[in-house]
Image: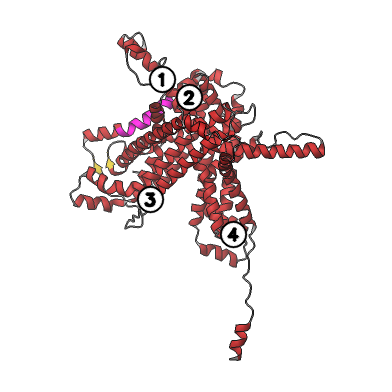
Amino acid sequence: MTTAVYLAAAPRRPRRLHRPGLWTLAAFAGALAAALPIGTAVWLAFSANENVWPHLMATVLPGYIVTTLILLAGVAVGTIVIGVGTAWLVTMCAFPGRALLGWALMLPLAAPTYVVAYLYTGLLDYAGPVQRTIRAVGGFATMRDYWFPDIRSVEGAIAMMALTLYPYVYLLARAAFIEQGPSAMEASRTLGCNPWQSFRRVALPMARPAIAVGAALAMMETLNDFGTVDYFAVRTLTAGVYNVWLKMQNVGGAAQIALVMLAFVITLLLLEHAARRRQRYHQGGGRYLRGPRYVLPPGRAALAILVCALPVLLGFVVPAGVLLAMAVENFSAAFNARFPEFAWNSLRLAIAAAVICLIMGTLVAYAQRLRPSRALHHLSRVASLGYAIPGAVIALGVLIPFGALDNGIDGLARGHLGMSTGLILSGTLVAVLFAYLVRFFALGFGAMESGLARVKPSMDMAARTLGRGPTATFFTVHLPIVKGSALTALLIVFVDVMKELPATLVLRPFNFETLATQVYQHAATEQLELSALGALTIVAVGLIPVVVLNRTIVRQREGTDGS
């Protein structure tokens, strides 16, 4: 009784508060930095000095929204039709050249959309070789004598984007069809389903979540595109941000249009999440077993070859061939004294951005593993939205706070030191690299998060019992295991930065050009022949992740033979 009273009267120990470690503090700082431009754009939209929202709604904004919706819908339909159809054929059907086409169908991913748009404009416009041939063969004098589709239109932009963005759907749909295994298809065959019925009733519903993710990625890339819509004079929300911000000098109005774009992005993410919600499919085996494919008769095999080869031909072979011919013909004019400088600028920015994104992604992913935190989890998810945010919005969110910080530093320097510091952030490569971090943080974080998830927690415990701290454990235990994921993230960020145009165009320092901005400027002045060498270099670099992705699919999904 006395003991019981004593225990009851004993004071309760206060709960021990764990101090955040260096990994956690660095992770919070990195995630907050990556989320800063998104918050800045929202703040600018609601705190603009001049409320131009009623004027925008009464004039240009409805047109921007309608055009953007049409563009998104068209790209979604085009990428789904091309991506799903070709993925099904190369995965489930047997026909000559199937293995080669399965690899080649990823090649359009290497070509930036705006480059393909520039090339097809040169081929298909009134002065291009296609219409010149039509007039010569048909004996037509002017364009009024015949009909030819206008490449510089919404429909033309949809075609260009569908041809270059369908690999997003193709890759995910192909992986989904492979992961289904042969059991579902064999069960549908025993129930009397022909190949079309098996595809429509079994394979397609099971692959629907993956298809939705691929279509969402393609639509987000469509929202981010500026080079194509600007060159085609298609008035989308992205073009509206640039027009209102840079031409009308109205930052608040640009932020309000950017807010509409953020709403589009969030809607796309919610739709993609809803498509995957309550979709749970499991296969019976451990590995992805390969079952018998549908052997196509000669006529249908020829049609399958045509269906799979046409996107490769139009999305990569024709643009790459035209680029190569133009680059060779105009090499002496294009490879001037500044071309190596442009190439070096692109190379160093891409390397620096890839390393920064990998470091920051590793910090956040490993900190979350060391000490799971709901706050850090939510903050990292907000920071990862940057990959879905258009470059125009990110540029707006970076330039405003960096400009304010530059002005504050300059004011302090003038007041206390009697000297001006100038633009040390917004006028330098710091702003460009920061925008790249915001844009591609999700790639580094996602790769390292998935890589670290493969490391068993018992390995951490074993390292701790041997006296290794968190940092030593990461470098000696985790890094050797996740180096493949780290290399993949580095390559993808490197290539994406080489192609990136909207944020670079706005934030680059004066007289600083990259291959992407040089290609855009030559194309904007109708000097396509001078842009060919730079565009071909970008496409050649873009082949790197295509090769990596193909090897990953062959090894992890279908086996080492790739048959």
Q: Which mark sits nearer the N-terminus, 1 or 2?
A: 1
Tell me the quarter of the picture where residue 219 sits. Answer: top left
User: Which numbered dot is residue 473?
Assistant: 4
Left or right: 215 as drawn, with respect to 342: left
Magenta stretch: dominant secondary structure: helix
Residue 431 in the image: above or below residue 558? above
Mark 4: amino acid = Thr
Closer-to-camera residue (270/286): 270
Element under disc 2: helix
Q: Which mark sits nearer the N-terminus, 2 or 3?
A: 2
Mark 1: amino acid = Leu
Magenta stretch in the rendered image? 307-321
Residue indicated by mark 3: 276
Distance of mark 1 from mark 3, alpha carbons? Answer: 41 Å
Q: Which mark sits nearer the N-terminus, 4 or 1?
A: 1
Element under disc 1: helix
Mark 3: amino acid = Arg
Tell me the quarter of the picture where residue 429 sits. Answer: top right
Distance of mark 1 from mark 2, alpha carbons? Answer: 15 Å
Residue 105 in the image: above or below residue 462? above
Residue 296 in the image: above or below residue 485? above
